[in-house]
Image (spheres, rainbow, N blue to C red):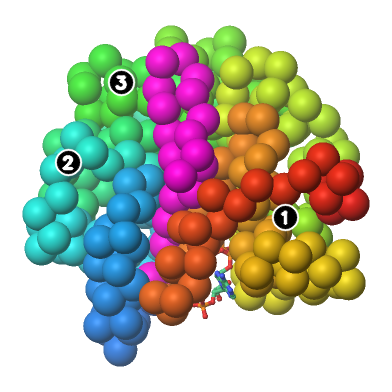
Amino acid sequence: MKYETVHNLTLPKIGFGTWKIGGESSPNPKMDSVSLAALRSALELGYTHIDTAEMYAAGHTEELIGQVIREVHVKREALFITSKVMPEHLAYDQVIRSCEASLRRLQMDYLDFYLIHWPSVGIKLEETFWALNQLVKDGKVKHLGVCNFDVKLLKQSQALSATPIITNQVPFSTSDRSYVKNGVLEYCQQNNIILTAYSPVNQGHFRINKTLESIARAHSATPDQIALAWLVLQTRVITIPMSFNPVHIKENWDAADIILGDDEMKQLN
Ligand SMILES: NC(=O)c1ccc[n+]([C@@H]2O[C@H](COP(=O)([O-])OP(=O)(O)OC[C@H]3O[C@@H](n4cnc5c(N)ncnc54)[C@H](OP(=O)(O)O)[C@@H]3O)[C@@H](O)[C@H]2O)c1
């Protein structure tokens, strides 16, 4: 595994995403056993960064994560748990209540990272950060971050946060470079902010081209693994692929160890 360090915090380059674990916009009990098996398999392989949100399966995803962590007896301090507050809950009291509800469902007394899931339309960022800073002060959250923020919103967040903004979570893959084009990747790299690439294999609708195929063949790897390796070889970039399939979960983990040459990186760029 490769790691990324900012502000004395060292994170694995590859973590585990959980959108659709336990359901999509509402809980789907039929998915519980496959979801629990995927989480178990990730934790047993050694994944330590688990990304979730109150929005995922309306909180049920967090419940399943809490259940599996207890079952596999992994030490809480060995894990990095990310959760997110949804854009409808960004007023002061709602942020506090959302975080407490996430902690209850996860059966934890703190989150490593608490992120704003999407920018708010109606609530001022000042009010949201007032609550987020309070959660850090109270020890309920260790570090703050944001998702889907452009450079302007990132700068505002940095000014409002009492602690460094650790990450901006945005879509980034070989087929989606929108946050490279809008300058966010470069801004994160220059300002010690981790860019967490979500949907790194394009939600399973991954476009495989000849370049990816030939580089994959040369490394005896799959195109998905090469796409992940390309991401995590970039400075300040980590990623959080999601999978129900234990074979893919292992392949994604192993992708962090693939070394691509300068020429291969250039071709993929
Ligand atoms: N902050 C935000 O706004 C935001 C938005 C979206 C996502 N996220 C986070 O980012 C995580 C990842 O993004 P995502 O779930 O949207 O998309 P993703 O990880 O790009 O794609 C997941 C899909 O890709 C397939 N897959 C994964 N690894 C594979 C492999 N090695 N080979 C072949 N297929 C593979 C999975 O199918 P199988 O189950 O068959 O492997 C699954 O259908 C989410 O789970 C969530 O935690 C955050």
Position of residue 158 in the picture relative to residue 5 (left or right): right
Mark 3 Cα-neighbour bin, 10 Å: few <14, some 14–19, many ≥20: many
Q: CA distance from mark 1 to mark 3?
A: 31 Å
Position of residue 205 in the picture relative to residue 67 (left or right): right
Q: If the picture is divided into quarters, which one holds ligand 1? A: bottom right
Of the image marks 2 and 1, the number of the one nearer the N terminus: 2
Assess whether residue 7 is covered by the magenta stretch: yes
Q: What amino acid type is highlighted by mark number 2? A: Arg
Position of residue 16 in the picture relative to residue 205 (left or right): left
The residue closer to the viewer here, 155 or 164, is: 164
Q: Secondary structure at mark 3?
A: helix
Picture coordinates of residue 243 (x, y %)? 47, 71
Picture coordinates of residue 101 (x, y %)? 23, 48
Residue at image point 10% right, 63% down: 71
Mark 2 Cα-neighbour bin, 10 Å: few <14, some 14–19, many ≥20: some
Tell me whether the residue at label 1 lies in contact with that at label 3, contact meaning CB atoms closer than 8 angstroms.
Answer: no
Q: Looking at the image, is mark 2 or mark 3 nearer the viewer?
A: 2
Residue at image point 87% right, 45% down: 263
Residue at image point 31% right, 25% down: 142
Q: Is residue 137 visible?
A: yes
The numbered disc on residue 76 is 2
The numbered disc on residue 136 is 3
On the image, which quarter does residue 249 sit in?
bottom left
Range of the magenta residues? 1-22
Residue located beneath label 1 in the image: 173
Of the image marks 2 and 3, the number of the one nearer the N terminus: 2
Which residue in the rendered view is the most extreme toward the bottom? 30
Mark 1 Cα-neighbour bin, 10 Å: few <14, some 14–19, many ≥20: many
Q: What amino acid type is highlighted by mark number 3? A: Val
Q: Is mark 2 within 8 Å of ligand 1?
A: no
Q: What amino acid type is highlighted by mark number 1? A: Ser
Examine the rendered structure and indicate whether residue 120 appears above or below residue 191. Answer: below
